[in-house]
Image: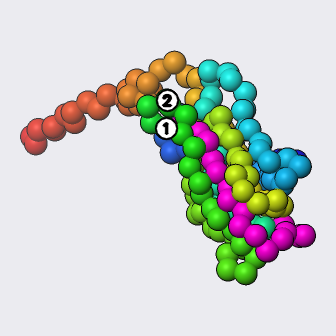
Amino acid sequence: MCEVQCSERGCCPGGRARMESYVFNCELSSKVPFYTFQGDEEESFEQFLELRTLCLGDGAKPEHNVVEVTALNHRGKKVSVPVANLHLSCLPMVSLGEFELKTPVTFRLKSGTGPVSVSGLHLIAYEDDESDMSEEEENEEEIVPIKPAKKKQKL
């Protein structure tokens, strides 16, 4: 089960792109061992998942719970990497900081029965096409030409 909670909106420096972020949370268990985050496949924006934490949920057994992430690498090839080995007695939670992955992303409970909670942010970057002019062209229109001052002669 995954859920999206709140929304934050902001602008990127330069005003050319806009970023939206939504908090997400998935729970992996023996009943639901994987979750794939597809996102929309529109060309007008890019989507990323920023992983923050993985932690054992209520009712977890004292066993090793290995969580694996599958995503595309820089060459466009699918790669699966274990990101956490959680255990009640020694490591019930892992903080990943701001581990960013481009969608689609699959989370898989490779071993253990969970539940394991995966949380982070769903980031959407939009290109702003409000103006066809470049920033230089806009600045040129705003500049008023300066005329040299006329010197007065003393009589």
Farthest residue in the top direction? 132
Q: Amino acid at mark 2?
A: Gly
Q: Are marks 2 and 1 in contact (CB under 8 Å)?
A: yes
Displayed quadrant of residue 11: top right
Disc 1 target residue: 73
Displayed quadrant of residue 89: bottom right
Q: Which residues are magenta?
A: 57-72
Residue 117, labelled with which disc?
none
Disc 2 target residue: 76
Q: Amino acid at mark 1?
A: Asn
Task: State left or right for residue 106 relative to residue 34.
Answer: left
As for residue 115 lying within the magenta part, the answer is: no
135 over 109 or under it: above or below? above
Q: Residue at x 66, y 40 (%)?
A: 105
Crowd tier of the residue under label 2, counting other residues whose Cα lies within 10 Å: few below 14, some 14–19, many 20 or above? few
Give the CA separation, mark 2 to mark 1: 5 Å
